[in-house]
Amino acid sequence: MIVDHPAAKKVVPPPRREGHVLSDAVRAKIVAEATNYPQARSALLAALHLAQAEYGWISPPVVREIAELLGLKPIQVQEVVSFYPMFHSRPKGRCHIQVCTNIACAVAGARKLVRQVEDSLGIRVGETTPDGAFSLVEVECLGSCGSAPVVQVNHDPYIERACAEDIAAILRGERVERQSPMISVIPEGVDGYLLPPNGVTRTEIADYLAVGGYEQARRAWCELDPDAITEMVKESGLRGRGGAGFVTGVKWGFMPKNPDKPSYLAVNGDESEPGTFKDRQILERNPHQFIEGALIAGRAIRAVAAYVYLRGEYTVPYLRLMHAIEQAYARGFLGDNVFGSGRSFHMFVQRGAGAYICGEETGMIESMEGKKGQPRKRPPFPAAYGLWGYPTTVNNLETLTHVPVILRHGPTWFRQHGTERSTGNTLFGVSGHVKHPGVYELPLGTPLREIIEKYAGGMANGRPPKAIIPGGVSMPVLTAEHLDTPMDHESLQRVGSLLGTAGIVVLDDSACPVRAAGVIARFFRHESCGQCTQCREGTGFLYKLLKRLDSGRGTMADLRTIEDVCGYMEGQTICALSDAAAWAAGNFLRRFRADFEAHVAQRGCPFPDSFEM
Amino acid sequence: MVKITVDGREIEVANDTMLLPALIEAGIHVPHYCWHPKLSIDGSCRMCQVEVEGSPKLVIACNTPVREGMVVRTDSPRVINARRGVMELLLVNHPIDCPICDKAGECLLQDYSYNFGTRKSRTDEPRRKLEKRKDIGPRMILDQERCILCRRCVRFCREITKTNELAVFNMGDRSVLDVLPDAPLANDYSMNTADICPVGALETKDFHHKLRVWFLKKTPSVCPSCSNGCNITIQHYRNQIWRLMPRRNDAVNDTWMCDQGRLQYAFAHDANRLRLPMVRRGNTLEPCGWDAAVKHVSDALRATAKKGGAERIALLASAHFTNEELYLLTQLVKVLGLRHVAVPLVTGSGDAFLIQPEKAANFTGARELGLVAHDGGRDFTAILELARSGQLDALYVCGSDMTKLVEPTLWQAALRAVPTVIVQDLFAEPLGQFAHVLLPSLSWAEKSGTFTNRKRRVQQIQRALEPPQGQPSDGEIFAEILGQLAEGHWTFHPAEIFEQIGKEFPAFAGLSLASLGLLGAELAP
């Protein structure tokens, strides 16, 4: 589903002719969507979503028709279709069942759900029933680790905490509709500012205005100097919440001060790293604060528009964000005369299509331009050559949600939260073997043990924690001995890991580390964009080696090969996906070497109670 | 220029370049797959990583600008280990079917494995199965398993031909190079993708499974198919051409050539080539010795000149002859006092890139040497009209491509009306039946000399194939005839004649074959 943009111009598509298969309505939506961008090609992903929703799959005639509508060659459309897992170049079942099988869902028994579908329908993963009613695929992380396991049917809202009864209902042809569980909270005693009060969902603009919302954006556009805003954010010490932790104000400072061409704000809402499910909470519960943050950032970097790239599977967050944007346009907070300042600032939302690599900033830019999401080599950097070749700042969605608070209370107030160099609160996602998986807003520097034991309710099955991934599966794994580590950039670096996205995955001692590493390796193999040699071949090789160990065919020499391959993959590629894959596999091997060796010695997995791969 | 230090040695390089081309220019070899001098930088193969002081990570030389004082290591343990990694990983899924691969012997995967690889495999996992010998266009086949996804060919079709036939589909280790079913790789330059493919993924149908490349001898030459003068190497073995490949010349063709030109070579060793001179006796042409044939020609020309004057002799020469051969024809014109001379130019379609409408290599040369009075075509038809109306007693036709310019009935009627027709050509067809003397000609691959391209650039061709023992070159035939008709000692040595041209034609002044080198030189304005 693609929601019409509030400022969309009315465009009439060229008349249908022989060979065209899309309806006039979809054709009109595609050409209208194209007007949201300086280049029509940027509407490609939206066009494919629209076409697939109507036609069921992206057939060669659909490819040709979309190419025609957007002024592209068919091959430029087809290569994009082939790149993104959400687009189907073959017909799928009318009920397309997607089961997330990555780490948190695997731990929560996703494999059983897959088997249930397979056994009931007599098809295997990747197949469609002969009558075309059902098809089944495994997907890599739907960004809902706090309510695992998760199943998605077609492009509908998720079925969270899915169970055997849900699957049975789906197979009976019923539509399983369920409110998302409220899994994000501000724990008692925490001075929270990212989430609305517990239990409250603040999707209406009136509710946000009632708590002083958009006041800081108004100040930014009507009173403050852009550089003063940047200075304030720099002073606050705010660091990016997307994984790399770069100082936000410094990044804004890279943008041209007297631009002779348009500058853009590109917002990264493509969270899709297993263990990470925080941005979704902001969009579902507090979208206006994010919009306000984007407005302030847009002013600070002198941008003409913000383009938000949202992961394609997120349907509810998308609808809520579009609803909020419509309201902001209606009030004149977005548009051609922002807050009556005489200046223009627009906000558009693009839906991704299931490729994790589009969360990498330049992969995202490529995807936003309607291409395969393959990261760009640097130099040039986005601040000089970003979206459509123009200066662009890429910020994570959560990062921008902090910004209104910094302006309201000042940098000094902000710095009172968190540690000296890791300032502010953040949204810690906790998943895996804990009693209460969820998203907890806490100051940076909160000890890992406190997060697991106090907020997440401790371990779920009474077994001790064994492997803890601190910030999304690309971050080096920790062990029980690191439980007292404060969760901030510096402390984690000291113990050989990184904060990443602050998505904590906790595994107890029933979980096989080889299997955990294998599930994560499968993810990176699936998500490698395929450009750089080491990443394309290395991610696949690592997965095969880990699978060998799991199946009992591994040798001691294979352990050495894993180490060498990790060495080849680290620090040598265009983007950090290769590093992430190497860190994950390499550190599981380093921290749990004895368990790996036991797989060789015993010719199989010594963890009888482990989750399935 | 800036000074940089590479492996402890200081070198000077141009200041606005990336490190990789600068190192190559300086003769320092850094292995690379995706980088190509005439394509945009891709930066994905990661083979050209080097160590640069001050940079914590290795950097890819292809995308690192040089700067003053830069200290580079191309041979440190880290660099060596990184290359080893790329090589080991590239081979994890490669089929290693070198025994049946056309590229074997000139394959960068083989060479770099040997030089930088691990020499052992650590995987017995099944390799990726993809399509082999896929027919992707009229002249190309694709082996998807061998492809290392460097995307040179994709960029070629995007940036050079702008036809976009090739793309990499899917992602990760499922990535695969392919075309769309209804849009084959059929552009006029498609075979260049085989040249730039660092492995055996893209192969030409023309060369497929014909010969192991290590048997090939390579002779630098120029493509004779049009007036662009693309630089090539003639690749030959056992006196046969197996393929033509473009040779880099940034002033002419960069590193490319068109498919049509590339495929024009089989005629050179066609079994039907004329190899013995022939003289007409009644209704048949009978072989004769070279001396007799030359004497026959010169006697006829002398007799005709004496009887009816030079007015009754015409010379038609193809624009395929070299400058040196054409120079001797200018001397023949002078000696006999000929007035009816034409170098008819065959034209066809051209494009905005390399393919020119003038379908001969040396029309510009003929013009520079004064053999083209006005417009070649009109001279040609005027001469045919003279012949048809009985105003010619002798006609000397060198080359037969000009017959394409007019209706066959027209030139046939003309030739029938002339009492003495001398034909010098590669084949008996189409002119032989009208000839009274038939002299075998040599192809461009069998002779040395120079062509002048449409931009007035003089470039050398060199003999790649040996003509049969005793068969003189066209230049030698002209020299022999001149020796019979004029005073002095006439011989044919291309280098000497080229120098002589320089003395008589100011545009060529100061040039020598040695100074032309492999890349040629432009004529003075």
Image (spheres, helix red, strand yellow):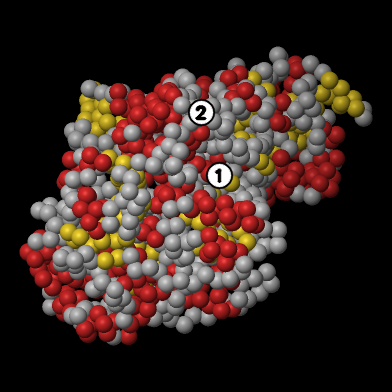
Residue B525 lies, with reference to residue A50, above or below; the image says above
| In the displayed structure image, the side of residue A412 where residue A219 appears, left or right | right
Residue furthest front in the image: A462
Q: CA distance from mark 1 to mark 2?
A: 33 Å
Q: Position of residue A170 (x, y in %)?
A: 57, 66
The answer for which chain carries disc 1 is: B
Residue furthest left in the image: A412
Crowd rating for badge 1 (residues with CA inside 10 Å; few <14, some 14–19, many 20+) = many
Q: Amino acid at mark 1?
A: Leu
Residue B524 lies, with reference to residue A393, above or below; the image says above
Residue under the point 15% across and 77% down: A219
| In the displayed structure image, the side of residue B69 where residue B144 appears, left or right | right
Q: Position of residue B469 (x, y in %)?
A: 70, 14
Q: Amino acid at mark 2?
A: Arg
Query: Looking at the rendering, which quadrant does residue A413 occupy?
Result: bottom left
Q: Nearer the viewer, mark 1 or mark 2?
A: 2
**Residue B177 image label:** 1
SS for tag 1?
A: strand
Residue under the point 58% across and 20% down: B214
Which sits in the foreground, A437 or B189? A437
Which sits in the foreground, A213 or B523? A213
Residue under the point 20% across and 76% down: A217
Crowd rating for badge 2 (residues with CA inside 10 Å; few <14, some 14–19, many 20+) = some
Residue B281 visible in the shown view: yes
**Residue A350 image label:** none
**Residue A553 image label:** 2
Residue A577 lies, with reference to residue A44, above or below; the image says above
